[in-house]
Amino acid sequence: MIDTRKASLGLALCFAVPASLAALGSGCGDDSSTSSSSSSSSSGGGGPTSTSSSSTGGGAGGAGTGGGGGSGGSTSFDCSPPTGTLPTLALTEVASGADGLVAPALLTHAPGDTSKNFILDLSGKILVHQGGSVLATPFLELDVAFNGEQGLLGLAFHPDYATNGRFFVHFSQPGSGDTEIAEYARATDVTANPTKVRTILTVDQPYPNHNGGSIEFGPDGMLYIFLGDGGSGGDPENRAQNMNSLLGKVLRIDVDGTPPYTIPAGNMAGGAPEIWDFGVRNPWRSTFDACTGDLYIADVGQSQWEEVNFEPAGQGGKNYGWRTMEGTHCFNPSSGCNQAGLTLPIFEYQHTGGGRSITGGYVYRGSGVPALRGRYFVADYITGQVWSFVGSATAATDVVEHTTQLGNGLRITSFGQDASGEVYIVSVSPARVQRITAQ
Ligand SMILES: [Ca+2]
């Protein structure tokens, strides 16, 4: 029953938005190959597992000075505790389709550079937002597979980008759709050299969907690569639990050693040496708290549950459970699964509430809305629901839903964060990038 409902919903979505945008998660790609969903037809419920309260935000706890995760250089993140009560939030548009956006999927920054932002477009472009407008000339244009969940998926600037000009992209290779991580170099302040410096890593993709996306430098200066399970539905070859496959993993490599990369100390043993964590399904958007270095992995669910995992700074070696579990629930087998050694999410919501594809965001570290500091933002692509909460290794607390103020009607592909710690919502159909502000 639910399969029929989902299939028709997915089909509608595929026609409602450009085909290349429709299925970042489970919107179009998965369901035809999914036979394991239960036949639950209930409606309602399905909210976050953590209860909501509306206090001022619990503080990030122990956030020290800035300059942590993802940003090796000096920054202007505000790592002080939150102050005041949450105001009514609003969105301020900073870019749209009129600026050349086709399918924006990230806004990010070079470490320490508060003068400009970079907007990643799934179609293969990286645009520069500077001085209140999008520059007409793209920073870089790449030839990528741009279809369904394939495209230009991730962008990360080297911690020393200000001096070395190195940056990295994650894209689906034209033709094959296989995963490639590649290095490029700055040409001028607002343009890149179109000639690739080198290919860092390629991974064969057995199916078009579940390519993951985010690449991020951690507080340790290593490059973290978030890869999905290879696709289809239900991880039919059980790749996420296979330590000899790079799919369904968080990888961690050192791009400062002998090219193309070296293996840093501290990765998992007993399999592919790049593996930092395993057991993820499609960690499309995953980010480090810029102040604490804690890692938030938002993992798109299969049939029932969308989830956020919390990894304390520096603690790898986790098994996040897929395909044994979906969220905090057994998936394969559907009951009585062995949960020993698994790290379960701190936040989840059920598809019966309407949401079906989680879009991870950032921990707010700005100064524009002081009450938001330390709160992690997350959304659902299908419904436009937006939440924020304070994360820890054990729970998501003080969950607040912001949908009516921030998300209604938006197809949220991603969030973004600038070098001041402000957080943006990135959406498609129509293409827009908007900053979260106080009304
Ligand atoms: Ca999981």
Image (cartoon, rainbow, N blue to C red):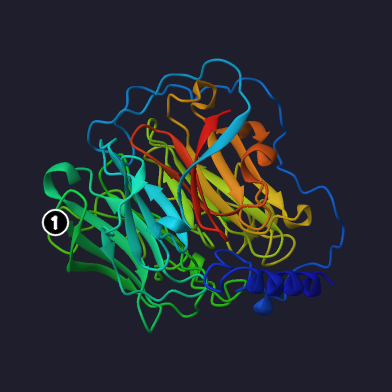
Residue under numbered circle 1:
187
Where is residue 436? Give x, y as percent: 52, 36
Q: Which of 425 and 33 is in front in this view?
A: 425
**Residue pushed farthest bottom?**
175
Residue 57 against residue 139 in the figure, above or below: above
Q: Nearer the viewer, residue 334 or 137?
A: 137
Which residue lies at the image location 22% right of the left edge and 62% below the top edge? 183
Where is residue 372? Give x, y as percent: 53, 27
Where is residue 379? Give x, y as percent: 60, 48
Q: What residue type is labelled 1?
A: Ala
Q: Residues within 10 Å of mark 1 (few under 14, many from 20)?
A: few
Q: Can residue 277 be seen in this view?
A: no
Which residue lies at the image location 29% right of the left edge and 67% below the top edge? 141
Residue 33 against residue 316 in the figure, above or below: below
Ligand 1 sits in quadrant? bottom right
Where is residue 133? Give x, y as percent: 36, 46
Which residue lies at the image location 49% right of the left edge and 58% below the top edge? 284
